[in-house]
Image (spheres, coloured by chain):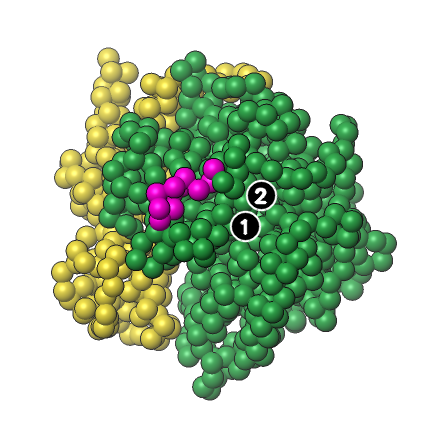
Amino acid sequence: MRFSIYRYNPETDAEPRMQRFELESVSRGMMLLDALLRFKEQDESLVFRHACGEGHCGADGVNVNGVNVLACTTRLSILREPVQVTPLPGLPVIRDLVVDMEAFFSQYRAVRPYLIADDPEPEVERRQSPEQRAGLDGSFECILCACCTTQCPSWQNNPERYLGPAALLQAWRFLNDSRDTATEERLNDLAGPYALFRCRTVMNCVNVCPKDLNPTEAIGRIRRLMLKSSL
Amino acid sequence: MNLPRRRFDALIIGAGGGGLRAALQLARGEAHVAVVSKVFPTRSHTVAAHGGINAALAHVVPDNWHWHMYDTVKGSDYLGDQDAIEYLCRAAPRVVYELEHMGVPFSRLPDGRIYQRPFGAQSQDFGGAQAFRTCAAADRTGHAILQTLYQQNIRARTHFFDEHFALDLIRDTDGHVLGALVLDMASGEPLLIESKTTLLATGGAAQIYKTSSNASINTGDGLGMALRAGIPLQDMEFFQFHPTGIVGKGILITEGARGEGGFLVNGRGERFMDRYAPNSKDLAGRDVVSRAVMTEIREGRGCGEHENHVELRLDHLGTEVVNSLLPVIRDICQTFLGIDVSREAIPVAPTAHYMMGGIPTDRQGRVVAPERHGAEEAVPGLYAAGECACVSVHGANRLGGNSLLDILVFGRAAANHIAEYLGEHRYHRPLHQGSVDFALERLARWDRTGSGETVPGLREELKSTMDWHCGVFRDETVLKAGLDKLLDIERRLDDARLRDHSRRFNTARIEALELENLVETALATVVSALGRTESRGAHYREDFPQRDDAQWLRHSLYHRDGRQLEYKPVRMKPLSVDSIPPSIREY
């Protein structure tokens, strides 16, 4: 199986290049991460992130043939050859497939991604009905891999002003938590033409999310909530 | 060389649940805290804990902390320290409620309280009916806890050094720990972090095995650092093999799958756990179930063409239970096996999962080591918590649901003691240059050029050696042969060379540094396993199949210097209740 992988080490390279790699035998069920690890044994200077290898941790987002994926849960058998592997788009490259994610995480921090509950703490848990709790399904599972945000054309056009699907999904996760008391402040944070409203419902985020989450829907729900609260 | 320096009150190495819980406690207490992690914090392996966290909340059936304590002592095969276990079980409800207040999205019961599921080796009334003690956020409990702790640390403005690899502790000649030398992975340059206190929270080391449920980052870095700083490791022979890893891959299928009603069958379709654990069956202790699985396979009753696994069946649970309570298991099996668990059985075999041993600590999280005044002497300024530490609450075998509890209870306890220590030690001690030079040399060694052994080659050899020589069943001949191979690998490690000597995000260099820690950890494991001539918990010696309380009711301490073993007594006295005496362990 033929691969073409993005290589760039600013320490030694004048400019980025694509390097060809070849996998002689592909066993059944082999994942893209397995291939990258094999290539690193051949050429230890190839650099990429990975950790859990099972799709839980979100470390190994890369772009394959134009689509963002997690390397560890992407089967080689579904990929078109030559397989083009490049870094997640729209973020500065540190080296090879490793991007600087600070811009992504600072947008995550900007939505105040933590529970704010101003009522006095009970000595036991705050009650939450199974129905209220079910409202968090589809948002708390986000693994912060950045596949969605970096695939979003609106974010690519306004990476400093539009918060992007991942951060907005987390904004919704807390807006929709029955225990959270900061609804008004959270909505104020998102006001204005860019932070929230640059979503054009292209739905790339939904198509690429490795956890099958739906940020577009969450953004729509925030908009409806904002409309309702402004009436 | 002009080494950049930073100074903090507390340095926390590792950003999993233990490190982040400690950081949060300290940051809220206005200490100046630095968290160093070789990955972005939410990639830490706590993220992969599926099933849940134990606390006797009694939400489903009657329960109390004393029953939880009894189960944990029995589960530890009586090697756990009973003062620490009492502390763990009594603190559990509070720790869980704190998590809920921080925002963890626990699954809920119809009345709105936290959902609890049954897990292995949980009983009511000291060995009676099955308890429901494991608090869960579906089967993403670790993910939910890790992200929530990270989020609250953002709120508390904790200082993070992401993608910084800790090289070695800085320790002066009086034995005080003064911080650590770390490597900024992006720039490839070292950074000296001086700190009045240092907490090791680096997690586990199941990467010493080829078949493992652990992330590639679980390389025992804190263990290597402790050993090189002259600190021994405790009870390293006790390594837990989880009975249900996907065969050939080692990927974990949570015990929660059996908690929700799944069961194991052999190649003849028999529910064989009936024979090994007549009462608890599939929910017996993990060591018991793993040995049962291996016995079925070894005696020719395995499944599949190679008869090398058994099957875990969930197909009778119904899609609703699977979708609401085991969605991760459903997705893992779909992704990695292409099977639908609501119709097909999962092929499983034991997988290396959890290290009961580690850096010896007391129940305040202080690292203790025999130097001048006995085995319980604290190393000034040094703490450890979580899987890298050995308190010991898990003894010879950990119960499912107790590891998330351990990291939170003792991460928090360590932070509380650190705060106290900072009150009494207000100033940084003078830097010890010799110790800095030693750490820098560790880095410089990988600048040597030329041809030689490769890091991946040695690492794969080490992992295969551990699978073959230090697995579920052990004996002296097999262990000794394994030790010889490890010593050979250790010798050849000195000849290993990197091909890539660049600085910027050089992961080959990180892997080389990790390999050094893997070798240290594997040696500690095999030497400790050879030393213990009995069978207890996860350590099963075919040449010594009985537990021997007269001689072996004691903890092992492995010293790097001369690879010596010494022993210290188990703390049998709890804090307030009667001691639970050793008895025959049956499920």
- Give the residue drawn at x 73%, y 34%: B580
Identified by mark 2, the residue type is: Arg
**Which one is in front, B524 or B121?**
B121
- Give the residue drawn at x 57%, y 64%: B522
- Is residue A78 visible from the viewing direction of this image? yes
Can you tell which chain is drawn yellow? A
Name the magenta segment's main secondary structure.
loop
Which of pointers 2 and 1 lies earlier in the amino acid sequence?
A: 1
Can you tell which chain is drawn green? B
Host chain of mark 2: B
Above/below status of A46 relative to B367: below
Callout 2–callout 1 Cβ contact below 8 Å: yes
* SS under mark 2: loop
Labels 2 and 1 share a subunit: yes
- Give the residue drawn at x 33%, y 45%: B346
Q: Which residues are magenta?
A: B264-274
The residue tagged 2 is B398
Q: x, y (%) of residue B528?
A: 66, 61
User: For mark 1, does the 10 Å Cα neighbourhood hold few (<14), some (14 to 19), or many (20 or more) residues?
Assistant: many
Identified by mark 1, the residue type is: Gln
Q: Quadrant of the N terminus of chain B?
A: bottom right
- Give the residue drawn at x 64%, y 49%: B536
The residue tagged 1 is B240
Host chain of mark 1: B
Above/below status of A121 relative to B360: above
